[in-house]
Image: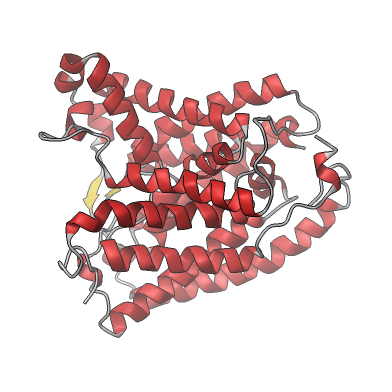
Amino acid sequence: MGPLIPNDIITGDWNFVIAILIGIAFGFILEASGFSSSRNLAGVFYGYNFVVLRVFFTAVIVAMVGLLYFDYFGWLDLSKIFILPTFLSPMILGGVIMGVGFVMGGFCPGTSFTGIAIGKTDALFFAIGLFLGIFIFGEAYPYFANFYNSGNMGNVTLTDVTGIAAPWFALGFTVIALAAFWVTAEIEKKVRKNMKEYKF
Amino acid sequence: MNKNNNKRPHYLNPYFGGVLLGLLVIATFYITGRGLGASGAVKSTVVETVETLAPQHAESSPYYSKYIPKDTSPMNNWLVFESFGVLLGGLLSGVIYGRVKKFRVEHGAHTTSAKRLVFAVLGGVLFGFGSQFGRGCTSGAALVGSASFSFGGVIVLISIFGTGYAVAYFFRKLWI
């Protein structure tokens, strides 16, 4: 049955209406979880606030298990959904650069939009930086076009690469997430004792 | 700053927020066959800007030209509409929880507003630049990519957070 739009159950005319509605839900969840605050987000790297890890890991395991059930019951054809392609070395480098940007800027793109929505100047400056960063990339692209396009493995899944069935990855992520929830809760308790000026 | 902190902000339980976000990822795949995103909307904005100011430059560029549709604007893009929704949704939540206030800078206790803003721009530049190599940011690549079992998604996830922990020490004065 699903995905509904690629299977023409909902016509493509609704695409942009649905995009806005999904975006509203996304922005609401991010803001309501505290992701409009850079101090909340950066906390994951310093042990004083692991809200990012809790929300992120929970979302990943819920979505993984849910997608497998939707596929199992025949509601969603997983072969028809978009799988992010893998360009191995460029994506590792991209992640490294984004990791530094995250710690310096205290936001990621989606969370900065919600920060702007509630009036955070730092979120606005971060988003201006995003614009500049992509512009610089676009202008300098010819210098590293070869690297950018290297390591293309296609739209591969974890199963394609390792031969291990998807449910095992869902199980593995769930176990890691539960362990991380427990360990980080202990760390957070210890770190917060020494932070007086930040209310959680 | 400290005055605002006297009252505990009211947020969703993070596990509840995570369940909602996971369900939204499933719903998005179920309806559209694709995932959420954020950096893609900024890319469309950059392409639109360059296309407007220097159309010949944009069309001859091997990068921008990939994202200029033949019969419509680069802004006529799913992620642009979705990201506009993110702004609205953030505003809605902010209004409900009383967090919408006039523009202000949030920063750690041991840094200044000016320094915070400089690092916010620099961080944004790096994040935007890196997201092009990463084929997406924390939303499209790390979250949705990993959730849909994409190998590259998990690579970006590990790479972003691994690096974050590796370099956090050098930027600690900004936050703690």
Place of residue B44 in the rendered image (x, y in percent of width and height, measured from the top left): 30, 34
Residue lying at 45% horizontally and 69% vertically, measured from the top left? B23
**Residue B84 falls in image quadrant:** top left
Task: Please tell me which residue lies in front, A73 or B135.
Answer: A73
Residue lying at 47% horizontally and 58% vertically, measured from the top left? A25
Question: Does the image show residue A10?
Answer: yes
Residue lying at 30% horizontally and 19% vertically, measured from the top left? A139
Task: Please tell me which residue lies in front, A73 or A23.
Answer: A23
The colour scheme applied to this rendered structure is: secondary structure
Place of residue B139 in the rendered image (x, y in percent of width and height, measured from the top left): 44, 50
The answer to whether B48 appears left or right of A106 in the picture is left
Residue lying at 75% horizontally and 34% vertically, measured from the top left? B108
Q: Residue furthest left?
A: B70
**Residue B48 falls in image quadrant:** top left
Task: Name the quarter where the C terminus of chain B is drawn.
Answer: top right
Task: Please tell me which residue lies in front, B161 or B103.
Answer: B103
Task: Name the quarter where the N terminus of chain B is drawn.
Answer: top right
Place of residue B144 in the rendered image (x, y in percent of width and height, measured from the top left): 39, 57
In the figure, B34 relative to A123: above or below?
A: below
Q: Residue furthest bottom?
A: A73
The number of discs equals 0
Question: Does the image show residue A180?
Answer: no
Place of residue B85 in the rendered image (x, y in percent of width and height, measured from the top left): 42, 48
The answer to whether A128 appears left or right of A83 in the picture is right
**Residue A186 falls in image quadrant:** bottom right
